[in-house]
Image (tube, helix red, strand yellow):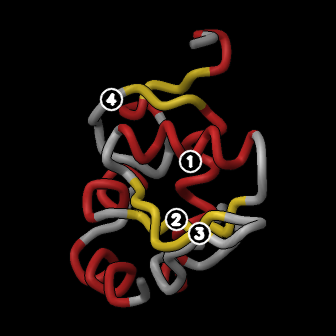
Amino acid sequence: MNTAHTIPVAQHPYVAPVDVLEDQEMRYLHHTLGIARLRAREHWGRRNYFAAGTGNQQEVLGRLEKKGLVQLAYRTTSQAVYQATRKGCEVAGLRGAEIELALSAS
């Protein structure tokens, strides 16, 4: 892991302290859950999927899956669709009803 491009989860603006994720892993987790700096928090968790193409996207999501933050929902010949787990929602910074909303959006 290239530590020059990692963000301790405790220092990331949207998460509670848990572990260390690479910046790209956190971006993918946020994308999965619809979390964006310019998006109102009320929209966070209304989405819970990441349709990964081939190569790097699936590699990054595979690492998140090994950490228990996402799970494979289904795979087609051209993509794999992942959804955040409860732990992934918590690490991404969702709380209470936001987590339940994200899990029901699965």
Q: Assess whether mark 2 and mark 1 are in contact (beta carbons under 8 angstroms).
A: yes
Secondary structure at badge 2 equals strand
Q: CA distance from mark 4 to mark 2?
A: 21 Å
The quarter of the displayed image where residue 84 is located: bottom left
Secondary structure at badge 3 equals strand
Residue of label 3: 75
- Looking at the image, tell me whether mark 1 or mark 3 is earlier in sequence order: 1
Please determine whether, in this image, residue 78 is positioned above or below residue 56.
below
Left or right for 45, reference 32: left
| Front one among 16 and 103 | 103
- Looking at the image, tell me whether mark 4 or mark 3 is earlier in sequence order: 4
- Looking at the image, tell me whether mark 4 or mark 2 is earlier in sequence order: 4
Viewer-nearest of discs 4 and 2? 2
Find residue 95 and report its horizontal and vertical position in percent.
28, 69
Q: CA distance from mark 1 to mark 4?
A: 16 Å
Left or right for 38, reference 33: right
Say which amino acid is labelled 3: Arg
- Looking at the image, tell me whether mark 2 or mark 3 is earlier in sequence order: 3
Viewer-nearest of discs 1 and 4? 1
Please determine whether, in this image, residue 101 is positioned above or below residue 60.
below
Secondary structure at badge 1 equals helix
Disc marking residue 82: 2
Q: CA distance from mark 1 to mark 2?
A: 7 Å
Residue of label 4: 19
- Residue under the image location 54 percent in, 81 percent down: 47
Find residue 51 and report its horizontal and vertical position in percent.
67, 69
Viewer-nearest of discs 4 and 3? 3
Find residue 101 and report its horizontal and vertical position in percent.
34, 87
The residue carrying pointer 1 sits among few (fewer than 14), some (14 to 19) or many (20 or more) residues within 10 Å by Cα, namely many
Q: CA distance from mark 1 to mark 3?
A: 13 Å
Q: Assess whether mark 3 and mark 4 are in contact (beta carbons under 8 angstroms).
A: no
